[in-house]
């Protein structure tokens, strides 16, 4: 898939996100009177912009080769090194180094709630959370897959990924909690 097609798909997906108008009730009137809807929209826009920047930045690394333990474009990336580098470069957050540690340090979400920039985890080595990628929208994710391959976008609906899906996580941009090895155990 070409870089521009990926970017187009992301923009289309991101444009579907909207803030619902307040209900015609007491709480809705309170929100409107206090101008909270405008503030909520500004926060939503900032969050969407960060997710957009994250995905667009990640797309810029399509084709970088896989390298076990790699964490830069110069040396290559492994899956968790890629995710860690994208979050550090784009959002300024330093995630833990290993995929299972990244899962433990982020908030679990339902697959149906995935948004661009969320993390998706897979069991590719007969253990939970052994592979990680960044969700880009429309059921697709970007990752550094395996030795001999390069950073690429894949469809989560493909049988291989669908059977191995381990869960989705959201990175809390305010703070990433400290890694707890006990929480990483399945």
Image: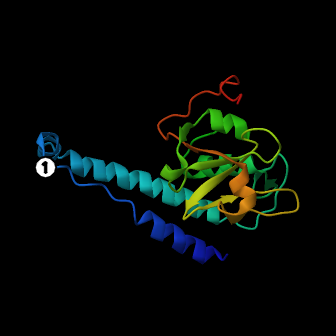
Q: Quadrant of the C terminus?
A: top right
Residue that appears at 56% across and 52% down? 90
Residue that appears at 71% across and 37% down? 100
Residue that appears at 30% across and 55% down? 19
Q: Nearer the viewer, residue 26 or 86?
A: 26
- Where residue 66 appears, as percent x and y from the top left, is 82, 57
- Where residue 33 appears, as percent x and y from the top left, is 11, 45
Q: Quadrant of the N terminus?
A: bottom right
Say left or right for 124 vs 181: right
Q: Is residue 162 visible?
A: yes
- Residue 10 against residue 122 in the figure, above or below: below
Residue that carries the numbered disc 1 in the rendered image: 24
Farthest residue, direction right: 148
Q: Nearer the viewer, residue 146 or 91?
A: 146
- Residue 171 against residue 74 in the figure, above or below: above
- Where residue 153 appears, as percent x and y from the top left, is 68, 65
Say left or right for 66 vs 135: right
Residue 126: name its quadrant. top right
Q: Nearer the viewer, residue 41 or 88?
A: 41
- Where residue 178 appears, as percent x and y from the top left, is 61, 27
Q: How is the image coloured?
A: rainbow
Label 1 environment density (alpha carbons within 10 Å; few <14, some 14–19, many ≥20): few
Residue 128: name its quadrant. top right
SS label for mark 1: loop
């Amino acid at each position: 898939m070409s870089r521009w097609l990926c970017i187009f798909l992301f923009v289309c997906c991101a444009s579907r996100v909207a803030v619902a108008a307040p209900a015609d009730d007491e709480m809705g009137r309170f929100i409107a009177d206090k101008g909270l809807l405008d503030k909520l929209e500004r926060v939503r826009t900032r969050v969407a912009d960060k997710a957009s920047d994250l995905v667009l930045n990640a797309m810029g690394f399509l084709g970088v080769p896989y390298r076990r333990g790699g964490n830069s474009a110069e040396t290559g990336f492994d899956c968790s090194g890629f995710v860690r580098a994208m979050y550090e470069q784009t959002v300024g957050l330093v995630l833990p180094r290993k995929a299972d540690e990244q899962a433990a340090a982020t908030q679990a979400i339902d697959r149906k709630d995935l948004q661009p920039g969320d993390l998706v985890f897979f069991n590719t080595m007969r253990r939970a959370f052994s592979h990680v990628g960044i969700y880009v929208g429309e059921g697709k994710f970007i990752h550094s897959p395996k030795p001999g391959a390069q950073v690429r976008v894949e469809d989560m609906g493909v049988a291989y990924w669908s059977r191995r899906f381990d869960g989705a996580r959201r990175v809390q941009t305010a703070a990433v909690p400290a890694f707890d090895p006990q929480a990483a155990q399945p």
